[in-house]
Image (tube, rainbow, N blue to C red):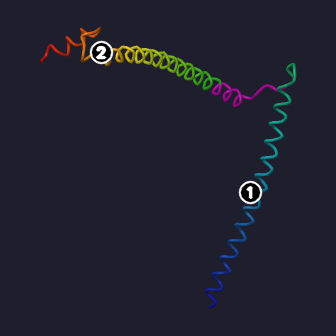
């Protein structure tokens, strides 16, 4: 029975150590989070000032900014290309709707006089009748 007790005791010790580590990590995370919020606030505040009182960004920040600007440029190009494709699709849709309306109007006239009389649908009747 001492083995089970020793195993349980070891598990409890490991669990206590894990809880302690997690507490320290949570405290450190909270500290980093507070620092990040403070830095963001300072950055916004310094960005709003007129003049060059803000410190020059370091090389890493400049590099990141250049990357973001490049990504932004690429995204703008993609949006513009998508906008052009949507415009083309809308033009095609408008054209097809007009064609459908015209065909619907002509089709209605053909249906009314098509099979019984030789009204205005002679070319259509000629095409249908020729292969037979």
Q: Residue at x 80, y 36 (%)?
A: 40
Q: Quadrant of the N terminus?
A: bottom right
Q: Residue at x 46, y 19 (%)?
A: 93
In this rendering, position of residue 17 left or right of residue 47: left
In this rendering, position of residue 17 left or right of residue 113: right
Tell me residue 15's x, y (percent). 69, 71
Count numbered badges in the picture. 2
Q: Residue at x 76, y 57 (%)?
A: 26
Quarter of the figure with residue 125: top left
Element carrying mark 2: helix
Q: Residues within 10 Å of mark 2 (few under 14, many from 20)?
A: some
Q: Which residues are magenta?
A: 53-68
Tell me residue 80's x, y (percent). 56, 19
Q: Nearer the viewer, residue 3 or 87?
A: 87
- Please state which of the two labelled residues, at mark 2 or mark 1, is closer to the viewer: 2
Q: Residues within 10 Å of mark 1 (few under 14, many from 20)?
A: few
Residue placed under numbered mark 2 in the picture: 113
Element carrying mark 1: helix
Residue placed under numbered mark 1 in the picture: 25
Q: Nearer the viewer, residue 33 or 14?
A: 33
Q: Earlier in the sequence, mark 2 or mark 1?
A: 1
Q: Quadrant of the C terminus?
A: top left
Tell me residue 6's x, y (percent). 65, 84
């Amino acid at each position: 029975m001492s083995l089970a007790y020793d195993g349980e005791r070891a598990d409890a010790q490991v669990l206590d150590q894990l809880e302690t580590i997690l507490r320290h990590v949570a405290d450190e995370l909270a500290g980093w989070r507070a620092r990040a919020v403070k830095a963001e606030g300072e950055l916004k505040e310094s960005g709003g000032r007129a003049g060059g009182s803000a410190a020059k960004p370091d090389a890493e920040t400049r590099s990141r900014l250049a990357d973001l600007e490049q990504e932004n440029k690429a995204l703008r190009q993609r949006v513009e290309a998508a906008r052009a494709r949507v415009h083309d699709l809308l033009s095609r849709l408008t054209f097809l709707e007009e064609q459908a309306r015209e065909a619907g109007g002509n089709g209605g006239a053909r249906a009314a006089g098509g099979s019984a009389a030789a009204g205005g649908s002679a070319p259509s009747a000629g095409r249908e009748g020729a292969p037979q």
